[in-house]
Amino acid sequence: MNIAKNMEIIFIAALALVSASTLANAAVPSHRAAHAAAVTLTVSPPATTMAVVTITAKRLSAAQKAALGN
């Protein structure tokens, strides 16, 4: 497909996509915005503490690694 021949159609399609996305993301009407602003949410941190796990182990020697097939 020769892009130069279809450049006008590509431009119009891109313009249509931008226009549609602009309308979809348009501002909320004022009568809906006032209701949404009245809702407040409060988030409290959880009361539990974070669990800490400590792992202690010996490293494998070269012979042990070879035995495992790594």
Image (cartoon, rainbow, N blue to C red):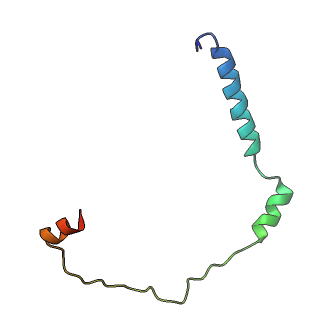
Q: Residue furthest right?
A: 31
**Left or right of 25: which side holds 70?**
left
Image quarter of the N terminus? top right
Which corner quadrant of the image does residue 18 belong to? top right
| Residue at (42, 86) in percent of width and height | 51
How far across and down, in percent of the image, does residue 25 sit? 72, 46
**Left or right of 63: which side holds 52?**
right
From this view, report whether residue 22 is shown above or below residue 46: above
From this view, report whether residue 28 is shown above or below residue 54: above
Count of numbered circles on the image: 0
Q: Which residue is nearer to you in this view: 29 or 15? A: 15
Q: Residue furthest top?
A: 5
| Residue at (72, 74) in percent of width and height | 40
From this view, report whether residue 41 is shown above or below residue 50: above
Image quarter of the C terminus? bottom left
**Left or right of 63: which side holds 34?**
right
How far across and down, in percent of the image, does residue 24 sit? 75, 44
Which corner quadrant of the image does residue 59 belong to? bottom left
| Residue at (62, 10) in percent of width and height | 5
How far across and down, in percent of the image, does residue 2 sit? 58, 12
